[in-house]
Image (tube, rainbow, N blue to C red):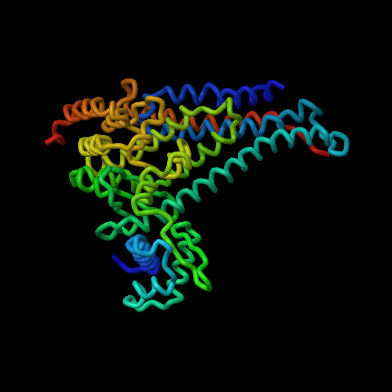
């Protein structure tokens, strides 16, 4: 995959988030830019200010929270990985329900009920019977 | 006066009974592209008729010669009536557009953060670490196709290519813009006129159209199997059907190899639908043109 600046930025955000998630238990008070830089920036040869910018952007996107600690900010992940995964899969119904949800994202299959599975299988069987050439 | 009445009747018909009848005409789903054009021209014609009815009434109200200095109140009333329709549409477009873009931006941030970029050359794909088989796309300039690990594990290769072709068809044909247009018109209408069934039907037509792309890529049987496999995944409570019992997925499987509508080849019916669509849009424009013919402003 070609490495574009946008890809690198995405990788960096992922690495920052990973660091905040894995250290969340040991450091519930959060991590400063300096600490995040020491953990993931030095190896990558990144400037301190680069990580400061990335964390600032992530705070604006509500991916991380921050609190003042003296002259520095302390950053924590806004949600756990499981919470974010769940949000990206079901996009919390209250926030974006019904029509809006259908229009914002186009799902391969939006609405099906467990009771529908039998009907679906019957419809597929009919289709396979109509197209025996393809049903191999 | 007859022309003005016709415009008003046309607007009412296109806003109330026509969408409700079209939503029930499920046979038209077999020609999804033509059906979508018909739906769009219905909406455009309804908006045109609503916008043009008041200005068309000017000759009937003041005669063929309009003296602005004397008859400006009539003109102002006509402008206000049309303006009300226009403002409702613009406000709705603004609100819907901003909501959608904010939701998509948030979603893109999330999948970029959580998802592993897809294998191969497709830089728009993201794979989420989750066992539920799900696939969707985030439309827009920075588009994404999102799959879960569960999708990759559950589907056969040809079924997977059907799913990906389906999502790519949504993105390439900008189906999101079609949905956005209908959502804007839907929300601009007063509550009692809104027809949820119409919005659901348009959404289904978009899915059927994307299924066509999947069938071209992987064949009807593999596409049908992909739909069944994706539906069979365990679904968390709360994400159940919102469509009021419509069997959307079953309907889609039945439409994968549709060849005829009411015994006629699909192409013939589609051609007729395109013709009706053209007439629908031309109707309010011609009625308005006739109404204000020979009108002079002094």
Vertical order, A62 against A88 (above or below): below
**Between residues A109 and A57, which one lies in front from this camera angle?**
A57
Q: Nearer the viewer, residue B237 or A128?
A: B237
Q: Is residue A56 above or below residue B23?
A: below
Q: Which percent across, then down, holds residue A100?
A: 48, 40
For residue B100, above or below residue B247:
below
Q: Residue at x 69, y 21 (%)?
A: B2
- For the N terminus of chain B, give its image quadrant: top right
Please report the residue visible at 43 percent of the width from the left and 31 percent of the height from the top: B200
Front one among A103 and B149: B149
Residue B275 visible from this viewpoint: yes
Q: Can you give x and y, in whole percent of width and height, for residue A52 in the image?
A: 46, 71
Q: Position of residue A82 (x, y in %)?
A: 34, 50
- In the displayed structure, would residue B193 be above or below residue A86? above
> Can residue B172 be seen in this snapshot?
no
The answer to which image quadrant residue A48 occupies is bottom left
Looking at the image, residue B181 sits to the left or right of residue B29; the answer is right
Taking the spot 47% from the left edge, 70% from the top edge, the residue there is: A53
Of the 4 image quadrants, the one containing the C terminus of chain B is top right
């Amino acid at each position: 995959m070609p490495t574009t600046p946008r890809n690198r930025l995405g990788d960096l955000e992922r690495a920052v988030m990973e660091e905040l998630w894995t250290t969340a238990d040991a450091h519930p008070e959060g991590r400063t830019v300096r600490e995040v830089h020491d953990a993931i920036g030095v190896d990558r040869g990144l400037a301190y200010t680069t990580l400061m910018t990335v964390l600032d952007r992530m705070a604006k996107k509500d991916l991380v929270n921050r609190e003042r600690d003296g002259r520095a900010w302390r950053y924590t992940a806004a949600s756990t990985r499981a919470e974010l995964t769940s949000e990206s899969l079901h996009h919390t119904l209250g926030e974006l329900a019904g029509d809006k949800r259908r229009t914002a994202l186009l799902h391969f299959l939006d609405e099906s009920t467990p009771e529908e599975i039998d009907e679906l299988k019957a419809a597929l069987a009919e289709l396979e019977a109509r197209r025996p050439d393809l049903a191999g | 006066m007859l022309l003005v009445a016709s415009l008003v009747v046309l607007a009412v018909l296109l806003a109330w009974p026509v969408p409700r009848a079209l939503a029930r005409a499920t046979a038209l789903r077999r020609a999804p592209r033509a059906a979508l054009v018909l739906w769009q021209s219905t909406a455009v014609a309804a908006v045109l008729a609503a916008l043009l009815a008041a200005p068309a009434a000017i000759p009937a109200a003041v005669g063929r010669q309009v003296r602005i200095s004397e008859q400006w109140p009539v003109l102002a009333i006509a402008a206000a009536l049309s303006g009300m329709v226009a403002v409702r549409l613009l406000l709705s477009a603004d609100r819907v557009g901003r909501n959608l873009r904010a939701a998509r931006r948030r979603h893109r941030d999330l999948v970029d953060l959580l998802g592993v970029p897809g294998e191969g050359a497709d830089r728009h794909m993201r794979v989420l670490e989750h066992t539920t088989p799900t696939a969707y796309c985030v439309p827009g300039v920075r588009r994404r196709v999102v799959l879960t690990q569960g999708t990759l594990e559950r589907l056969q290769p040809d079924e997977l290519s059907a799913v990906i072709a389906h999502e790519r068809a949504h993105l390439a044909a900008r189906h999101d813009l079609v949905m956005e247009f209908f959502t804007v018109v839907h929300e601009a209408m007063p509550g009692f006129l809104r027809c949820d069934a119409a919005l659901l039907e348009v959404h289904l037509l978009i899915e059927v159209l994307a299924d066509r792309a999947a069938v071209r890529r992987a064949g009807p049987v593999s596409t049908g199997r992909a739909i069944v496999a994706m539906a069979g995944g365990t679904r968390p409570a709360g994400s159940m059907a919102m469509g009021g019992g419509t069997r959307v997925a079953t309907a889609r499987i039945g439409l994968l190899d549709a060849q005829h509508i009411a015994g006629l080849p699909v192409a013939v019916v589609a051609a007729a639908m395109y013709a009706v669509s053209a007439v629908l849009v031309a109707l309010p424009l011609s009625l308005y043109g006739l109404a204000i013919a020979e009108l002079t402003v002094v």
